[in-house]
């Protein structure tokens, strides 16, 4: 059986046809520049990559083009035993705590909480509606980035502002990248031959977006991203933590509008704002050439990262595993080395030889004497979404392979 995983952005559609049992991606692709004069579609299957550059006026046209390439290049979806379509949705708000089977009511609820993620949820909703129209005979399942952090302790999820205002406007820490943190925290336990219930784990999801989580016994107890994906670590183009008064200052004294402040903090800050580059390969090249701005950008990035490692060590009390994942975490040995340097008193002792180079497979990179095991574990959000989609569809009796111990399909709080 297979699952088609769809991730709809404001002007793009990323997709994979996934084998949820074997774990491999059978086919994958991306539709880009939707609504622009010239669109782009790349589809990869069986070692063959096909790229088309045609106008793609909307998401419906984009998904139709994807299905046409499945017919033309393969694999044939009709004979691929597609048991579910899994959709990534960024924000589940306070409504959704687990993956859910898509219904009209669910789509309406996701749309209703779009003000919490105005850049993401509307595009996610569009993708779901289009996919349901074009693939009406397959169950559709939504997996939420915020779901893993839905059960955060109140002390961790609550902002210290007027409680009535917070309640009325849904202001709390929701957390993001939850699919990755959930997947990695469980997979690393299996990799180490340990029960996830016995482990205290810090997960560092370091990509263009970056987040940290503290996981006790398989349950998240703290995370760096907040009401939006802007809070926390320094990221590729996002600022991460800033004094809230900075926003007030820029509006009052620099004359910036709300939208301009939004653009500044989300798209023109982070590494991009400090160094002009948000690709770590280019950043390292600039540092090698003596660029002081690039060096400062790296220093700020590492300083924030180390601060969160220390804070989450205090939250957990004991850290059994520190995990690096996502593009930067898996591929940048310099970041891993700098993030853990000098933290031997906290139980973190990196082995420079084991740490060297990119890691395409799960790898222990700590010394044998390290109290905390340091692991690089590649994330696979598409596989995680596919497996959760199968569980929900099976629980609803929609795959013909029902399991008595599958989780319930509905996940409303």
Image: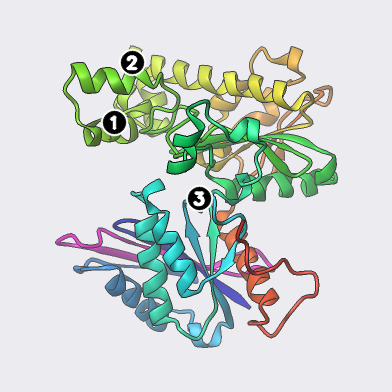
Report which residue position mark 3 lands on.
Answer: 93
Query: Would you place residue 21 above or below residue 70 in this image?
Result: above
Badge 2: residue crowd in 10 Å (few <14, some 14–19, many ≥20):
some
Disc count in the image?
Answer: 3
Residue 238, quarter of picture: top left
Please name the residue shown 78% across and 25% down the image.
367
Please name the residue shown 75% across and 44% down the image.
218
Please name the residue shown 44% across and 81% down the image.
135
Report which residue position mark 2 lands on.
Answer: 293
Q: Quadrant of the N terminus?
A: bottom right
Boundaries of the magenta span: 16-43
Q: Give the mark, 1 or 2, whose residue is nearer the N terminus.
A: 1
Q: Would residue 66 be visible to someone looking at this image?
A: yes
Viewer-side label of 3, 1: 3
Q: Give the mark, 3 or 2, whose residue is nearer the N terminus.
A: 3
Badge 1: residue crowd in 10 Å (few <14, some 14–19, many ≥20):
some
Residue 86, image x and y in percent? 53, 67
Please name the residue shown 48% across and 27% down the image.
161
Report which residue position mark 1 lands on.
Answer: 268
Viewer-side label of 3, 2: 3
Distance from label 1 to label 2 (Cα)? 15 Å
Secondary structure beneath disc 2? helix
Which color scheme does this rendered protein use? rainbow
Q: Is residue 281 left or right of residue 17?
A: left
């Amino acid at each position: 059986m297979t699952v088609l995983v769809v991730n709809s952005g404001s002007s793009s559609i990323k997709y994979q046809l996934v084998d949820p049992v074997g774990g491999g991606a059978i086919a994958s692709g991306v539709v880009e520049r939707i609504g622009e004069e010239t669109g782009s579609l790349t589809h990869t299957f069986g070692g063959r990559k096909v790229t088309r550059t045609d106008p793609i006026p909307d998401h419906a046209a984009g998904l139709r083009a994807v299905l046409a390439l499945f017919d033309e290049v393969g694999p044939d979806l009709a004979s691929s035993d597609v048991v579910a379509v899994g959709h990534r949705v960024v924000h589940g708000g306070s409504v959704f705590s687990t993956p859910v089977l898509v219904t009209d009511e669910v789509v309406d609820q996701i749309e209703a909480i779009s003000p919490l993620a105005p850049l993401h949820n509307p595009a996610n909703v569009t993708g779901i509606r289009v996919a349901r129209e074009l693939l009406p005979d397959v169950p559709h399942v939504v997996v939420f980035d915020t779901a893993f952090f839905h059960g955060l302790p109140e002390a961790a999820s609550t902002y210290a502002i007027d409680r009535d205002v917070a309640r009325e406007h849904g202001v709390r820490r929701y957390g993001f990248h939850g699919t990755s943190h959930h997947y990695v925290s469980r997979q690393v336990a299996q990799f180490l031959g340990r029960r996830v219930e016995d482990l205290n784990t810090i997960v560092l999801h370091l990509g263009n977006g970056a987040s940290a989580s503290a996981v006790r016994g398989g349950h998240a107890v703290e995370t760096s991203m907040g009401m939006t994906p802007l809070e926390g670590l320094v990221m590729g183009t996002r600022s991460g933590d800033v004094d809230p008064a900075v926003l007030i200052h820029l509006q009052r004294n620099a004359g910036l509008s709300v939208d301009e402040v939004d653009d500044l903090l989300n798209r023109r800050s982070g590494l991009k704002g400090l160094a002009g580059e948000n690709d770590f390969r280019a950043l390292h090249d600039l540092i090698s050439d003596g660029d002081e701005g690039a060096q400062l950008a790296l220093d700020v990035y590492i300083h924030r990262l180390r601060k969160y490692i220390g804070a989450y060590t205090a939250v957990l009390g004991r850290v059994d595993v520190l995990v690096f994942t996502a593009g930067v975490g898996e591929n940048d040995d310099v970041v891993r080395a700098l993030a853990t340097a000098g933290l031997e008193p906290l139980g973190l002792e990196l082995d420079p030889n084991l740490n060297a180079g990119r890691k395409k497979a799960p790898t222990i990179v700590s010394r044998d004497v390290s109290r905390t095991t340091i692991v690089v574990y590649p994330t696979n959000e598409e596989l995680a979404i596919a497996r959760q989609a199968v569980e929900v569809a099976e629980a609803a009796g929609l795959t013909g392979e029902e399991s008595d111990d599958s989780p319930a399909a509905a996940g409303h709080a």
